[in-house]
Amino acid sequence: MATNSFNPIKTTAAPDGNGSENSGSNGNGGLNIMSLIIYSLAFVLGVLGNGVVIWVTGFKMKKTVNTVWYLNLAVADFVFTAFLPLSVTYTALDFHWPFGKFMCKLNSTISSLNMFASVYILVVISVDRCVSVVWPVCAQNHRNVRRASYVSLCVWVVALILSAPYFIFRDTEKSHFFFFSCT
């Protein structure tokens, strides 16, 4: 008669079909390593690339409507890539969140804020280009840096409002012992 013993340390390990147990997140070790490489590469290139764009469009170029759009797009992407090391750590620790509840909420909020702000800024750029082509005289008379700045501010406010639920409802969940996940 075989007895089943409960081993609390290996509660997340699952049989892999060969009768042995694999460690990690359900056998996705290769996928996790690939994710770590991509996240790390995106962090380095994103911070450097967007940092250069922010420096050039914010400090070296004359303020125009287009520089306002691209500066805001670069800021959104820079903030997102600056928070990527949290995702790298989360993935490297096999989806254990060591940073606490506030950082879980903030990381999720920044990620969604980037998504909303980037998409809406790209929409604004597209609408601006369309108006410039379809009604060039009207665009020439009404496009200016001040209006572009107001539109950008509105985009950020809308993106922040749409990201607020992520800050409110995200939480850390204790799965076992000292293992927390950001859910």
Image (cartoon, grey):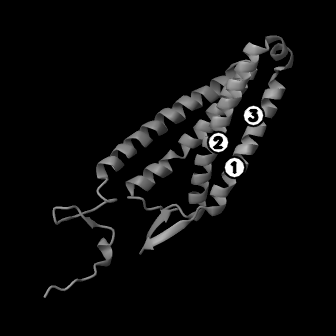
Q: Is residue 37 among what the camera can see?
A: yes
Callouts 2 and 1 close, C-beta under 8 Å? yes
Query: Relative to 36, does residue 1 appear above or below in the rendering?
Result: below
Query: Relative to 178, does residue 72 appear above or below in the rendering?
Result: above
Residue at disc 3, secondary structure = helix
Q: Say which residue label 1 marks.
A: 162
Considering every residue shown, the one lying at the far bottom of the view is: 1
Q: Position of residue 59 (x, y in %)?
A: 69, 25
Q: Which residue is located at x 47 percent, y 67 percent?
A: 180
Q: Say which residue label 3 marks.
A: 152
Q: Amino acid at mark 3?
A: Ser
Would you say 21 lies left or right of 99 here?
Answer: left
**Count of numbered circles on the image:** 3
Cα separation, mark 2 vs mark 3, equals 12 Å
Label whose residue precedes the other's in the sequence (1 or 3): 3
Considering every residue shown, the one lying at the far right of the view is: 141
Q: Position of residue 104 (x, y in %)?
A: 56, 59
Q: Quadrant of residue 82?
A: top right
Callouts 1 and 3 close, C-beta under 8 Å? no
Residue at disc 2, secondary structure = helix
Q: Is residue 58 among what the camera can see?
A: no
Q: Say which residue label 2 marks.
A: 116
Q: Quadrant of residue 4?
A: bottom left
